[in-house]
Image (cartoon, rainbow, N blue to C red):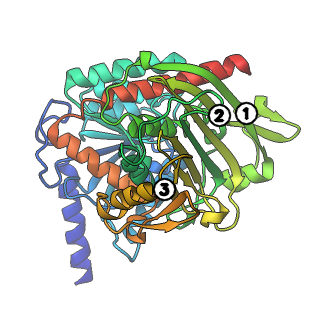
Amino acid sequence: MMKIKTILMGFLILVQVSSFGKGKQSGEKRAFNGAKGEVKLITLDPGHFHAALVQKKMYDQVNPVVLVYSPEGSDVNEHLKKIEGYNGRKDGPTSWKEVVYRGSDYFEKMLSEKKGNVVVLAGNNRIKTDYIKNSVEAGLNVLADKPMVISPENFPQLEASFRIAAQKGVVLFDIMTERHEITTMVQKELSGNLELFGTLLPGTPEKPGVEILSVHYFYKSVSGSPLVRPAWFFDVNQQGEGIVDVATHLVDLVQWICFPNVILHKSDIAMLQGKHWPTPLTLEEFKAVTQVDHFPAYLSTVVKDGKLQEYANGSMLYRIKGVHAKVTAEWRYKAPEGAGDTHYALLRGTKATLEIRQGEAEKYLPTLYVRANQGTNLTAFAAELKNAVVKNSTHKGLTLENVDQQSWKVVIPDSYKVGHEAHFSQVTEEYLGYLQTGKLPAWEVPNMIVKYYTTTEALKLARKNK
């Protein structure tokens, strides 16, 4: 009986795989209508764990058979191991069926076969911009992990990709998970309340209207297991410096929070300052993260006194539509006990400041504070704050905790705190909705272009100042 069941299961999988590329050519312009299994994923050259996180849950609209095209190597093996882990977990197992092609011609093979209709990109960033352009030229939709581009030289190619995507009628979108973090969502909501926050102050270079700092760690766990990063992750020519990598999220938040639904232009950006600096890593630390016991030859120029000088840190100061914004991305080896990646964000308004802190005092959990400006009628402000947070917020169940005479902490129920890994599914579901409508909101494409213009201009300036 068990043997018959196994044979039958194998037959069903074979039928699914053989029919996967049939029907209407995936590169043709077509409308998605939300039908079960109509979205057919292609995972191209997965080299970052974010590719797997897109598949941490199942979606009715997405076919369970996923095509993977990749060169031979540990990157694809680690990716498949994570998918197997999701399929085999006890709590809510997935049922993905990975059909894998390995070979040096993997990219050409994918483009010629076009068996799917959505390319998922998360891996080596050196060639990601090429992957994007060639994929949309082939009429394939693209869901790309950040960053889409890591150098000023390749920025025009990304701009061209968006033009081609529009011509081909396909949806090109990047994975902005931080928009789905509940503390950030509440901060955005309150910043739009004129009675409470007022208007965003333009600030000065010394005291910007917006400040965002993100601290990340090389050594970490993902989906319950220690993360193994590929050695190339530490090559800024392949991964990109922090100022064009993690900073992408931060620049996106400046735009998304401070200028909601506003179409931005490159002329709205004035880059004032760009800096970058290294995080030193010993060979022992490098080995713990990569499981590689030596520094590869391509890193030899940045190894000094036995330590890898990893240019993962970057800071930029710029004006966006007249508002001074400071964005900083930092990387360290390992987080303190009980901590993980942390986020800090400060918005200065004419009536109040909105500040997200995630330090030891907050038990390393993102926490939003609201502080009334000096000279404010505190009785009236407290009443307005209660109305905005407790009574009228779109996020129900929020409460307030008084910190001092001028400050309050916004208490957010745990049910909203789904965690960073779950945000990938939320972005994917958002993207599936865009596929059905056949387009992004009017501001998304121009603002993605402005976002990557901002990060690459910051890198350009940092290089000059090195």
Specify the amino acid type for callout 1. Trp
* The one of 217 and 1 positioned closer to us in this rendering: 217
Query: In the visual, does 223 lie left or right of 445?
Result: right
- Mark 1 Cα shell of 10 Å, populated few (<14), some (14-19), many (≥20): some
Query: In the visual, does 465 lie left or right of 255?
Result: right
Residue 255 image label: none
Cβ atoms under marks 3 and 1 closer than 8 Å: no
- Any part of residue 55 in sight: no
Q: Which residue is mark 3?
A: 378
Q: Which residue is mark 1?
A: 277
Query: In the visual, does 426 lie left or right of 289?
Result: left
* Residue 308 vertical position relative to residue 393 in the rendered view, above or below: above
* Residue 297 vertical position relative to residue 215 in the rendered view, above or below: above
- Any part of residue 267 in sight: yes
Q: Quadrant of the C terminus?
A: top right
Q: Which residue is mark 2?
A: 314
Q: Residue at x 57, y 49 (%)?
A: 344
Specify the amino acid type for callout 3. Leu
Q: In which quarter of the view is residue 161 placed?
A: top left
Q: Residue at x 66, y 23 (%)?
A: 462
Identify the residue at the far right of this view.
Answer: 305
Q: CA distance from mark 1 to mark 2?
A: 6 Å
